[in-house]
Image: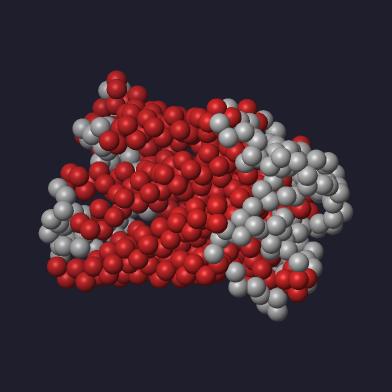
Amino acid sequence: MSHETAVEGTNYLNNGYSLRSWFLTTDHKRIAILYLFTIVLFFFVGGSFAVLMRLELMSPQGTLVQAETYNKLFTMHGIVMIFFFLIPSIPAVLGNFLIPMMVGARDLAFPRLNLLSWYVFVAGASVTLFALVTGGLDTGWTFYTPFSTSYSNTRVVPAMVGIFITGFSSILTGLNFIVTVHKMRAPGLTWFRLPLFVWSLYATSLVMVLATPVLAITVAMVAFERATGIGIFNPAIGGDPLLFQHLFWFYSHPAVYIMILPAMGVVSEVIATFSRKEVFGYRFVAAASLAIAVYGFLVWGHHMFVSGQSVYAGLVFSILSYLVAIPSAVKVFNWTATLYKGQIWFQTPLLYAFGFIGLFTIGGLTGLFLAAMAVDVHLTDTYFIVAHFHYIMVGGAVMGFMAGIHYWWPKITGRLYPEGWAKFSALVLFVGFNLTFFPQFLLGYLGMPRRYYHYPPEFQVLNVLSTAGASILGVGYLIPLIYLLWSLKRGKVAGANPWGATTLEWQTASPPITQNFPTTPVVTSGSYEFPALEEVHSE
């Protein structure tokens, strides 16, 4: 990607060290760092709940916590990890940091709105955490009615208020990205010269803006019914509990793509850079991002095959669920074709991208099992669902996040991490993940229900394997935290472009100067016209 720019000036990290300068900043890069610290904190909070669950499930009789506490643990784990880590992780951190630079702009379209989105996120998360530590919540992260509206005596209303507030953060971020991509692209940066990461975040932003208000309205109605006793979802007083499921999943299935589409964008960038080739079928991969976003609004009913909805509705949702796999498959096949005869450079980001492709493919294929009504009836609410979900979300979204953090870490900090430790941690994480969640496919196939405090003794061996895998997985997450923090002071200086990448963000200093580009870049070619790998190594 040809351009005209300079790389001189004060970088964003050195432009004022005071807390005030950080908490009042409108620099998109600093706001991304604020998001990064926030969501990493929530990741370990949510992970701690998962550790307690896995320790509890080592014994069939459950000896660590009481049944009521266990119900709260899986609820709190789901809420924290989904709403306060997975949904904001790549858009709020990598998207915030990179979108303006990737399109050649000095900042997002609405810098103050961007800062407000972080404050709204922190406010909503704080309210929800307050609910979790002052009594907890036992409804499951899905808040199914009428249990959440009438029967649970836990902190339903404050938890939902927090999620309601947090939703505005997603809407503000999505709106900012959409306007930035439409209005602030550098001269010459046409739509089909955009990096695929930008395409993925653009599609994600459309989902965030259109779907999040539905969740906000839904949780507001639950809180209102609980506070006033009016019958919206409670069948005892004329309400309809299935209405809640329709509204909730109308948001929550597109929310899966809010989590996975950005990771797909990361993988596209990593595959291209470390194979030294343009992504095969670039236009098809870009169109697939938009297709996934559109299809995501049409398949919510496959979560409701056993809810009593019409068999004919179930048939339609089943067919649509198979169709939504097509654009995802386009991406996987095109990434594979890109690697074919490429100059493969086995660096850590590429290892995480390989992990993403393998684990996401397993998650996607098992999703096709669940799209078949006859199979889904038997597997619903078993550990097969837990395993499928985590292969998509942890094997997919978290692997993508780790690939992105490692790929852009030299750009964010100006420092390189120790490559040996990074590759080792990627291997540990991959092994730990599969040992944790693959046994859960077997548990679900054998009929073990999810969310149960006790289970028959014949399931203990597989549960112990899963718990052992979780301990390895935890180590796999701790190692990067240590060496990335270490690299901030002791890592080798990265240089502006250690990977020899060709998108615009790599054409400025590392870490970037405050205004990104002293002069507006002028783009004269596509995003993936690579020099030979030997030229990168010789620099």
Most distant residue in the bottom direction: 341
Residue toward you, 270 or 255 = 270
Q: Can residue 246 be seen by looking at this rendering?
A: no
- Tell me what residue is drawn at x 55 percent, y 27 percent: 20
Vertical relation: 248 (above or below) 3: above
Q: Quadrant of the C terminus?
A: bottom right
- Tell me what residue is drawn at x 66 percent, y 58 percent: 494
Q: Can residue 111 be seen by looking at this rendering?
A: yes
- Tell me what residue is drawn at x 41 percent, y 48 percent: 43
Residue toward you, 182 or 11 = 11
Vertical relation: 254 (above or below) 109: below
Asked if residue 520 lies left or right of residue 46, the reply is: right
Count of numbered marks: 0
- Tell me what residue is drawn at x 72 percent, y 71 percent: 537
Most distant residue in the front direction: 490
Residue toward you, 223 or 30 = 30
Residue 511 spot, x, y in % from top left: 66, 48
Q: Quadrant of the N terminus?
A: bottom right
Asked if residue 118 lies left or right of residue 127, the reply is: right
Residue 454 spot, x, y in % from top left: 16, 57
Asked if residue 86 lies left or right of residue 539, the reply is: left
Residue 124 spot, x, y in % from top left: 43, 31
Residue toward you, 518 or 187 = 518
Asked if residue 259 lies left or right of residue 81, the reply is: right
Q: Using the rendered view, name the quadrant where residue 453 is placed.
A: bottom left
Residue 302 spot, x, y in % from top left: 43, 53
Q: Which color scheme did the rendering employ for the protein?
A: secondary structure
